[in-house]
């Protein structure tokens, strides 16, 4: 079995884009890490203004939406996986 070894410097976030359907972390080393916005139901349901009120947290490896009480780390986007209770759009429409 192999384990994922991530250097903390690889987790530094430079910028964030919250689109209609995606969440993108732009990393300091030039990479972009993208996840479907439905993975984070609270953020997905937020208003456009609320989605833009994010801040990179002090260690530089996570982003917070304080008004929404939502915090997402770069490692979470790299590893992948939806938040508990998240449903894909097709499933949510049923």
Image (cartoon, helix red, strand yellow):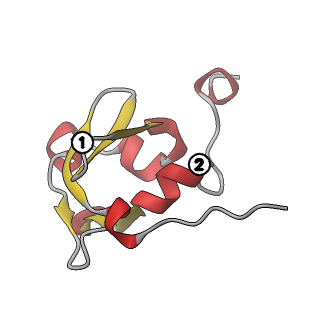
Quarter-of-image position of residue 59: bottom left
Q: Residue 88 placed where, x, y %? A: 63, 31
Q: CA distance from mark 2 to mark 1?
A: 19 Å
Residue picked out by circle 1? 30
| Vertical arrangement, residue 35 with respect to residue 4, above or below | above
Across and down, in percent, residue 6 comes to 50, 65
Residue at x 16%, y 46% (from the top left corner) = 52
Q: Quadrant of the N terminus?
A: bottom right
Q: Pick the quarter of the image with the C terminus.
A: top right
Give whichever of 27, 23 is nearer the camera. Answer: 27
Q: Residue furthest bottom?
A: 58
Residue 47 against residue 11 in the figure, above or below: above
* Left or right of residue 47, residue 24 in this image: right
Name the residue located 64 percent from the left edge and 38 percent from the top edge.
87
Mark 1 Cα within 10 Å, few/some/many (few <14, many 20+)? few
Residue 29, percent from left and from top: 25, 49
Residue at point 63%, 23% (across, down): 93
**Circle on res. 22:** none
- Estimate how packed mark 2 is, as few (under 14), some (14 to 19) or many (20 or more) residues with alpha carbons within 10 Å: few
At x 23%, y 66%, the residue is 67
Placement of 3 over or under 26, stated as above or below: below
Q: Nearer the viewer, residue 21 or 46?
A: 21
Of callouts 2 and 1, which one flags the residue occurring earlier in the amino acid sequence?
Answer: 1
Q: Which mark is residue 80?
A: 2
Farthest residue in the right direction? 1
64 w.r.t. 36: above or below: below
- Could you say where residue 68 lies in the image, as x and y percent from the top left? 31, 62
Q: Is residue 82 left or right of residue 74?
A: right
Q: Secondary structure at mark 2?
A: loop
For discs 2 and 1, the disc positioned in front in the rendered view: 1
- In the shown orientation, is residue 48 left or right of residue 11? left
Q: Between residue 57 and residue 94, name the one nearer to us.
A: 57
């Amino acid at each position: 079995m192999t384990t994922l070894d991530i250097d903390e410097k690889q987790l530094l976030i430079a910028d964030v884009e919250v689109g209609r359907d995606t969440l993108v972390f732009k990393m300091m080393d030039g990479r972009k890490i993208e996840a479907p916005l439905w993975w984070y139901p609270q953020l997905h349901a937020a208003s456009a203004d609320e989605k833009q009120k994010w801040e990179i947290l002090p260690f530089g490896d996570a982003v917070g939406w304080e008004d929404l009480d939502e915090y997402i780390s770069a490692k979470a986007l790299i590893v992948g996986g939806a938040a508990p209770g998240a449903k894909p759009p097709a499933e949510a429409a049923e």
